[in-house]
Image (cartoon, helix red, strand yellow):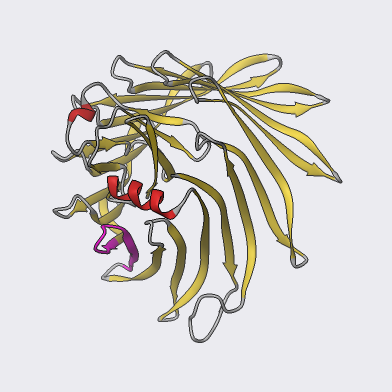
């Protein structure tokens, strides 16, 4: 099966919406993204549309190019100016021999030529863990320091510390840092953020995570540092269906004495476990009010029999999840890759991990969003979409 991610349709609901609180009433279209994929399931084009004057209008488009290793090598975005598409921004990617992304060069189109704008360079250790990221910006025809991130890991390759520096007065200055803790299953259980003020680190936020016996996240509790003590801020409670798919995120806000309703985020899936609708409600005046919803459309390239065979042969769970996924497989996995919606790889199988009957992959360090797991097995390629929240 080849699954093409065709479009994501954002429907922005008007304030007040409908009295019956039913999605679809008094909605107005807001934004749409159309994604095209090539023969190797790689994203090759992305078009952005806006709803104006009762019709879809395209303003921005991006094309993606890959090297012989199917790694994203370049992306070029264009904007519609008048009746012509004009170059806007170009990103050029470089990798090391282990397929780690070590540089992104960003250039803007000015006066009919590409001009440097930003550059990010990364360093990885022998375990392919990113240990530093340097952000540079182009000014007066030279690269100048902007920001620096450094990362520390435990023996299990879990990210346990991240610190960000800013360049000020010709020296790196502390800016913000994060600490992380994990349980024996490599699930993140705690994180702490601090910012640098008056030559000391000051607490900012802390988050506590809880999971059930199926490694599914059940609680996210965030606290804020207020007047020398931690105070409850927001918590999210998660519900799943029988297939371990997240169907409801319930947000609650602390009013100083108790938890009150804040947001509801309901997910609906099709028979192939693809997310097809996300419906958001917010709590106002003691009632749930429609906020917005997102509709997802997919194209399945290939017949239904082939699709069902692949879904049953390899099943990734929990999905959506926090970034740690288990692959329930009935075949021998020879190679595994994970990449984001732009085709940038974020993971390639480490030596020995695929020997397990049901291997566990941990990419909890990446940004939230949609990713694709590509599995190579017996001269076949299988693709599974996952969502990290």
Q: Is residue 294 visible?
A: yes
Residue 21 is inside the magenta segment: no
Judged left or right of residue 274, residue 28 is right
Identify the magenta region: 237-255
Relative image position of residue 296 (x, y in whole percent)? 51, 58
Judged left or right of residue 336, residue 276 is right
**Residue located at (50% from left, 40% from top):** 341
Q: Is residue 225 visible?
A: no
Query: Is the magenta region chiefly helix, strand or loop?
Result: strand
Q: Quick one: 69 or 236, which is closer to the camera? A: 69
Residue 249 is inside the magenta segment: yes
Corner quadrant of residue 200: top left
Above or below 380: residue 295:
below
Judged from this view, the residue extending furthest toward the bottom is 19
Above or below 57: residue 135:
above
**Residue located at (27% from left, 32% from top):** 333
Relative image position of residue 323 (x, y in whole percent)? 31, 42
Judged left or right of residue 247, residue 110 is right
Judged from this view, the residue extending furthest toward the right is 82
Q: Quick one: 149 or 6, which is closer to the camera? A: 6
Judged left or right of residue 5, residue 200 is left
Relative image position of residue 256 (x, y in whole percent)? 30, 67
Q: Quick one: 243 or 299, which is closer to the camera? A: 299
Above or below 305: residue 254:
below
Marker count (numbered): 0
Q: Quadrant of the N terminus?
A: top left
């Amino acid at each position: 099966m080849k699954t093409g991610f065709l479009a994501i349709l954002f429907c922005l609901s008007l304030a007040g919406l409908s009295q019956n609180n039913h999605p679809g009433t008094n909605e107005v279209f807001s934004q749409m993204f159309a994604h095209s994929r090539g023969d190797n399931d790689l994203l090759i084009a992305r078009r952005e549309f806006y709803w104006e004057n009762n019709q879809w209008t395209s303003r921005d488009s991006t094309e993606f190019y890959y090297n012989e290793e199917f790694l994203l090598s370049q992306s070029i975005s264009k904007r519609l100016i008048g009746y012509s598409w004009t170059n806007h921004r170009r990103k050029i990617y470089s990798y090391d021999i282990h397929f780690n992304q070590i540089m992104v060069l960003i250039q803007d189109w000015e006066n009919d030529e590409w001009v440097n704008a930003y550059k990010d360079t990364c360093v990885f250790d022998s375990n392919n863990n990113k240990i530093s990221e340097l952000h540079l910006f182009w000014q007066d025809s030279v690269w100048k320091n902007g920001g620096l991130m450094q990362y520390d890991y435990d023996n299990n390759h879990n990210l346990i510390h991240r610190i960000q520096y800013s360049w000020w007065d010709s020296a790196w200055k502390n800016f913000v840092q994060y600490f992380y803790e994990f349980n024996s299953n490599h699930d993140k259980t705690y994180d702490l953020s601090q910012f640098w003020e008056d030559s000391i680190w000051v607490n900012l936020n802390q988050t506590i995570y809880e999971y059930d016996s199926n490694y599914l996240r059940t609680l996210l509790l965030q606290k804020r540092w207020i007047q020398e003590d931690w105070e409850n801020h927001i918590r999210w409670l998660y519900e799943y269906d029988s297939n371990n798919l997240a169907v409801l995120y319930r947000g609650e806000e602390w009013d100083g004495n108790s938890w009150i309703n804040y947001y509801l985020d309901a997910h609906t899936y099709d028979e192939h476990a693809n997310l097809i609708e996300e419906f958001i409600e917010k709590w106002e005046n003691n009632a749930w009010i429609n906020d917005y919803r997102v509709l997802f459309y997919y194209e399945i390239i290939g017949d239904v029999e082939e699709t069902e065979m692949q879904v049953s042969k390899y099943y990734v769970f929990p999905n959506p999840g926090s970034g740690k996924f288990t692959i329930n497989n009935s075949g021998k996995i020879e190679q595994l890759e994970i990449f984001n919606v732009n085709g940038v790889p974020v993971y390639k199988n480490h030596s020995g991990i695929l020997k397990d009957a049901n291997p566990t992959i941990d990419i909890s360090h990446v940004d939230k969003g949609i990713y694709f797991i590509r599995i190579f097995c017996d001269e076949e390629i299988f693709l599974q979409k996952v969502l990290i929240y």
